[in-house]
């Protein structure tokens, strides 16, 4: 029995280490952008989206693919900044909330972003954890490693952004 516990623990540690390394691998994290640009974003379904935002210093278009953790209403998506407030896309949206979004077979669509308050973020995270417990079990320690701070189910240190599609 103790050996089984150790092997489960070592597998969990291996998954956390792999997820942490993946989050820090720029080439791997940027690979989905190529798929979206090749019109293959539908492969990710509605769990991922590609976000185009404007660089706050350069004014250049920037792209990032993010996991959608909630969709509270049609045309509204909640995403998490796994790198906290240090993430460039997060800082760029704070400076200029206008964006464009590709999701599934849809895109580009104009959108506006706003940072969720603590209560809204906690509710979104709680729903995500309930719906995707295995994904959260793997990603939580990896995000904590990246943030350098523990996260509880209220997500106190986990910034979230709601992206709402706008009409043209």
Image (cartoon, helix red, strand yellow):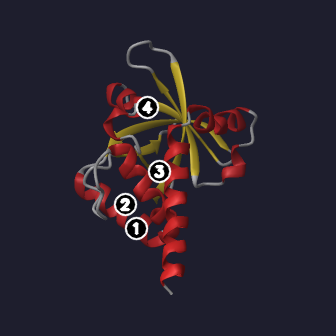
Q: Which of 29 and 154 is in front in this view?
A: 29
Percent x, y for residue 86?
34, 33
Q: Is mark 2 on a helix, strand or loop?
A: helix
Q: Disc count in the image?
A: 4
Q: Do residues under tags 2 and 4 come within 8 Å of each other at their CB atoms? A: no
Which image quadrant for residue 164?
top left
Q: Mark 1 points at which residue?
A: 127
* 61 w.r.t. 161: above or below: above
* 161 w.r.t. 86: above or below: below
Q: Is mark 1 on a helix, strand or loop?
A: helix
Residue shown at the point (41%, 29%) measured from the top left = 88
Q: Distance between the residues labelled 4 and 1?
A: 24 Å
Could you say which disc has been placed on residue 124 in the image? 2
Q: How crowded is mark 2: few (under 14 residues within 10 Å), some or many (20 or more)?
A: many
Mark 4 or mark 1: which comes first in sequence? 4
Q: Residues within 10 Å of mark 3 (few under 14, many from 20)?
A: many
Q: Distance between the residues labelled 2 and 4?
A: 20 Å
4 vs 3, front mark: 4
Q: What element carries label 4?
A: helix
Question: Is residue 75 visible to us here?
Answer: no
Q: Residues within 10 Å of mark 1 (few under 14, many from 20)?
A: some
Could you say which disc has been placed on residue 77 in the image? 3
Q: Do residues under tags 1 and 3 come within 8 Å of each other at their CB atoms? A: no
Q: Residues within 10 Å of mark 4 (few under 14, many from 20)?
A: many
Residue shown at the point (62%, 38%) measured from the top left = 28
Mark 3 or mark 2: which comes first in sequence? 3
Residue shown at the point (62%, 32%) measured from the top left = 27
Q: Do residues under tags 1 and 2 come within 8 Å of each other at their CB atoms? A: yes
* 62 w.r.t. 57: above or below: below
Q: Name the residue under label 4.
A: 89
Q: How far apart are marks 1 and 3 (CA)?
A: 13 Å
Question: Is residue 165 visible to us here?
Answer: yes
């Amino acid at each position: 029995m103790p050996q089984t516990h150790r092997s489960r623990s070592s597998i969990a540690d291996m998954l956390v280490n792999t997820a942490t390394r993946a989050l820090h691998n720029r080439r791997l994290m940027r690979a989905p952008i190529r798929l979206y640009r090749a019109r293959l974003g539908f492969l990710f379904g509605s769990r991922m989206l590609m976000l185009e935002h404007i660089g706050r210093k350069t004014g250049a278009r920037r792209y990032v693919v993010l996991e959608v953790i909630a969709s509270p209403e049609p045309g509204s998506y909640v995403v998490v900044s796994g790198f906290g407030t240090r993430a460039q896309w997060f800082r760029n949206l704070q400076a200029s909330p206008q964006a464009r979004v590709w999701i599934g077979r849809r895109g580009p669509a104009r959108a506006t972003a706003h940072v969720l308050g603590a209560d809204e973020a906690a509710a979104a995270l709680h729903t995500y954890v309930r719906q995707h417990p295995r994904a959260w079990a793997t990603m939580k320690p990896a995000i904590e490693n990246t943030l350098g701070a523990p996260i509880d189910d209220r997500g106190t240190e986990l910034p979230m952004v709601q992206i709402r599609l706008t009409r043209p």
